[in-house]
Image (cartoon, rainbow, N blue to C red):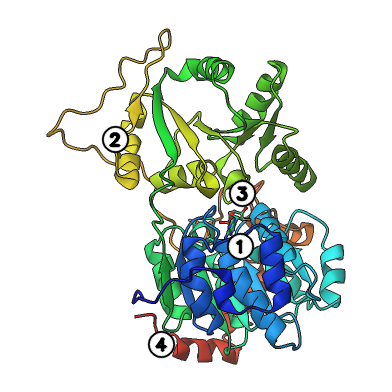
Amino acid sequence: MRSNSKPLLESFSDLELKPILAQAIARAGYEAPRPIQAQAISPALEGRDILGLAQTGTGKTAAFAIPSIESLLRKRGKSPRVLVIAPTRELVSQIDDEFKKLTRGARLKSMTIYGGVSEKPQIEKLRKHPDIICACPGRLLDLMQQGHVDLSFIRKLVLDEADHMFDMGFLPDIRRILKELPEDRQNLLFAATMPKEIRKLAQQILRDPFVAEIDHSAPAKTIEHALYPVPEKRKIELLRKLLKESSFASAIVFTRTKRRARQLAEKLGKDGHKAVALQGNMSQNQRDRAMTGFRKGQFNILVATDIAARGIDVESVSHVINLDIPNTAEAYTHRIGRTGRSEREGKAMTFVSSADIDMVMEIEKIIGKKIETIRTPGFEAPDFERPKPGHRKPQSRRPQPRKEGSRNSTGRRKKPRSSSESSSPSRRRRNTSSRTKNNAEGSSSPSQRRRSNSGRNSSSQKRSSRSRHSAS
Ligand code: AMP
């Protein structure tokens, strides 16, 4: 894929946008384009496919929303014309909020589609021909199969957090959706990291893309990182002490399991903190309440699991505390991307024990510096020592990415362990035997599998010929 050297956009006014959009941008308080916007908006307005390498918090939503809205305003036509696919309900809602903010005053409608809530209101909104659909892949596919969504007028497809969608096992669903889209469309693919499978997907769907890349793997420079060695059993005690002593505005505490997130939020609540959990076992309403409360400052501690918190955009998170170190270095950058947003300062505190040394070293590689170790008197973990120079690195704990569509021993597709996008009741009924509790979107229904195997859709044949225009 080629990178492009074009003069960077310095001001939104250079774009000569429709006045209604220019006003909405000003009303949103966006004075100057963010780096990802400075790179991506102009080529997107010219109709180029875009490969955006940027994580949430960089302003990437507006980087695809602004050109999408401008093109809807320039040329009216049958709807829906813009389809944005993103991995989680929270992210889909955030994207929809951004579209709503930037279409204020314009007669354009956007809507969300995701699982875990009733299909009915979504079906009703679809009947009113929204201009923009922001969707999670599973529910979208469900509604498409029931004949409620007609995607034949889509002119712009955005795949947001494509790497996360791969992690969650959504690529097969996405490929099915792609088959139903018109060939003649613009594609914008955003990812924070570029695993092999996403590179392959990008090569298949993007035609001569403009590559907009910001320092995607390194977290914001305004973040201070620190390691806190502590024995496993004393982590919560240390957390209580640090919360008491530090002057934090609002904090996200990450735990490895949903149960731990729920229990810890309860404990902190009993300590007198305004704490709330955000984890995959909660209903959509509970999750919405938690997020809204945290955003509005009604809660100032959010105890979350990775899957629930990824992509969440909350201004002014001052501290991210990793009670449990994440499983991958990429997950670390995503977690701490919740702080230091919009060029503010933030603190990333990670509790570690000797078992975490390899992961610490992988994280340091990604952030490009050694993280300071802070030993708290009374909480010593003397076995947390970095290896001496020349020490051979033991095998990494990093899990291997699941192969797309890989099958388990029963021949069924492997399911993502959990997801923040729940499946619909109808979908669950159809897939009862192949789904685990809490499983979300990765598995296909028998009818989906039949359809994907039949090869009856001629657009898929066209698509494969198109894939020859691979992003070089
Ligand atoms: P995102 O990466 O899309 O989640 O955006 C992160 C935050 O940056 C959101 O709260 C946006 O509203 C905000 N934002 C996006 N573009 C700009 C801009 N040009 N100036 C100021 N804030 C922005």
SS for tag 3? loop
Which residue lies under the disc numbered 4? 469
Query: Which kind of residue does numbered mark 3 sit on?
Result: Asp
Residue sitting nearer the eye, 251 or 235: 251
Decide which of tag 1 and tag 3 comes sooner along the chain. 1
Query: Which kind of residue does numbered mark 4 sit on?
Result: His
How far across and down, in percent of the image, does residue 48 sit? 49, 82
SS for tag 1? loop
Q: Please report contact status of discs 3 and 2: CB closer than 8 Å, yes or no.
A: no
Q: Distance between the residues labelled 4 and 1?
A: 25 Å
Which residue lies under the disc numbered 1? 86
Does the image show residue 377? yes
Query: Which kind of residue does numbered mark 2 sit on?
Result: Lys
Residue sitting nearer the eye, 251 or 448: 251
How packed mark 4 is, by other alpha carbons closer than 10 Å (few <14, some 14-19, many 20 or more), is: some
| Residue 313, numbered label | 3
Q: Please report contact status of discs 4 and 2: CB closer than 8 Å, yes or no.
A: no
SS for tag 2? loop
Residue sitting nearer the eye, 187 or 235: 187
How far across and down, in percent of the image, does residue 377 sit? 40, 9
Q: Please report contact status of discs 1 and 3: CB closer than 8 Å, yes or no.
A: no
Q: How far apart are marks 4 and 2 (CA)?
A: 42 Å
